[in-house]
Image (tube, grey):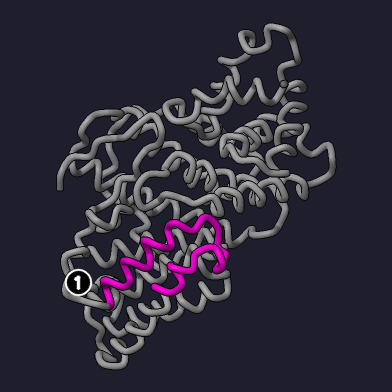
């Protein structure tokens, strides 16, 4: 495995094996697609679907046409291979699942995921898939993105405990989540651990900015990133549409991950971002009486800053701006020299919950100007 170079400051590319790259021209599955019509059509379909900004079938006729053609070929192939499908067939089915993430509604996606499970079962489980684990890695990453769309836990998990944790000094981000549990706004240890692990990954990537990682660290961060997304998918499903603090936190950490880890296969589209922003705003609105957030002002400031970092025009963004303005005035007061007076304290606050000074902090000044403008 070659070393890994962090790409900054626009985003961090999620550590991942070559089989899950978003650029399909560099995928190891491209060569077998040259002689396999099903796999070729599936790759074309997922490439066309990637151009669709929101999950609306009318937005991409080409993607739908290619998807329909590939699905026909898949059904024909499954009928021939029947009880033990070849790797190329499984790969094509996973790619079509990925294409549907941009084109299908929630119920259709659930049906597709169920079909994938049935296909994988013909091989007696994920670990029996071939190509030295490449098919399994592609399956797990697509499952992670699927969980974000349908608000359900991931189906294909990795080890609970990942060996080889690096001995790195990572104490800058996430200090809030390492304090006494009684001082936190949630007692859910899974949420707290998901926040801690996300901050650990971000800080480790920043420490290795523009450096070539050792393969062992690269592989550890890849598995840890998988684990963090899988853990949060379980928590997100548990608290979905509950309108409580737990839902606010886990949706915010998910949005933060997409904003920071938006390279390669984890590239979110605008639907992912807007959906999470909308969910966060609705959860904040639904959480307790009007004075609830007075007790958790720092948490509210962090949540609203992550929403504002998404940078898109919507009613939710404007609502977040107004709430954040009031929260900042309540926390710091408003003075003519406001930015010089408390910008360092603000950066420390955001880092304590989860942030990236490399990726996001260049926008703090601009966000504050817009908030008070």
Would you call the spot at circle 1 few (<14 residues within 10 Å), some (14-19), or many (20 or more)?
A: some
Residue at 25%, 90% (x, y): give it.
81
Q: Is residue 191 left or right of residue 5?
A: right
Residue 48 is a magenta residue: yes
Query: Which one is nearer the viewer's eye here, 78 or 147?
Result: 78
Residue 9 is a magenta residue: no
* Helix, strand or loop: magenta stretch: helix
Image x and y of residue 347, in percent: 55, 21
Q: In this view, does 28 lie above or below 80?
A: above
Residue at 42%, 78% (x, y): give it.
68
Query: Which one is nearer the viewer's eye here, 298 or 185?
Result: 298
Query: Which one is nearer the viewer's eye here, 289 or 100?
Result: 100
Please state the extent of the stretch shown in magenta in the rendering: 38-66
Q: In this view, does 345 lie above or below 224?
A: above
Tally the marks: 1
Query: Which one is nearer the viewer's eye here, 181 or 295?
Result: 295
Image x and y of residue 335, in percent: 74, 9
Image x and y of residue 262, in percent: 42, 44
Q: Is residue 19 above or below residue 299?
A: below
In which quadrant will I find the C terminus? top right
Which residue matches tag 1? 130
Describe the element under mark 1 as helix, strand or loop: loop
Image x and y of residue 127, in percent: 26, 71
Residue at 54%, 75% (x, y): give it.
108
Q: Is residue 85 above or below residue 144?
A: below
Residue at 32%, 83% (x, y): give it.
73
């Amino acid at each position: 495995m070659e070393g890994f170079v962090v790409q900054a400051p626009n985003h961090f590319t999620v550590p991942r094996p070559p089989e899950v790259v978003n650029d399909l021209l560099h995928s190891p599955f491209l060569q077998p697609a040259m002689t396999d019509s099903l796999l070729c059509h599936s790759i074309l379909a997922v490439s066309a679907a990637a151009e669709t900004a929101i999950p609306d079938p009318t937005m991409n006729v080409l993607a739908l046409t290619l998807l329909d053609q590939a699905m026909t070929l898949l059904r024909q192939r499954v009928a021939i291979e029947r009880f033990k499908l070849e790797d190329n067939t499984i790969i094509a089915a996973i790619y079509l699942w990925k294409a549907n993430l941009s084109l299908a509604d929630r119920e259709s996606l659930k049906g597709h995921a169920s079909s994938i499970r049935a296909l994988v079962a013909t091989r007696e489980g994920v670990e029996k898939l071939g190509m030295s684990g490449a098919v399994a890695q592609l399956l797990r990453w697509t499952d992670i993105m699927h969980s974000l769309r349908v608000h359900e836990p991931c189906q294909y998990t990795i080890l609970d405990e990942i060996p080889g944790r690096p001995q790195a000094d990572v104490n800058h981000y996430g200090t809030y989540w390492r304090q006494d549990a009684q001082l936190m706004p949630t007692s859910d240890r899974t949420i707290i651990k998901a926040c801690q692990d996300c901050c650990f990954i971000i800080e480790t990537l920043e420490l290795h900015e523009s450096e070539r990682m050792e393969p062992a660290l690269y592989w550890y961060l890849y598995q840890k990133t998988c684990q963090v997304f899988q853990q949060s998918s379980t928590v997100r499903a548990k608290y979905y549409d509950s309108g409580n603090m737990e839902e606010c936190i886990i949706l915010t950490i998910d949005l933060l991950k997409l904003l920071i880890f938006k390279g390669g296969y984890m590239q979110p589209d605008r639907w992912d971002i807007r959906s999470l922003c909308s969910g966060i705003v609705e959860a904040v609105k639904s959480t307790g009486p009007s004075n609830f957030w007075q007790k958790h002002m720092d948490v509210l400031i962090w949540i609203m800053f992550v929403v504002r970092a998404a940078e898109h025009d919507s009613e939710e963004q404007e609502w977040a701006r107004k709430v954040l303005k009031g929260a900042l005035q309540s926390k710091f007061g408003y003075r003519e020299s406001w930015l010089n007076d408390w910008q360092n304290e603000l950066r420390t606050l955001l880092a304590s919950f989860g942030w990236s000074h490399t990726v996001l902090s260049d926008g703090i000044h601009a966000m504050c100007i817009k908030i008070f403008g």
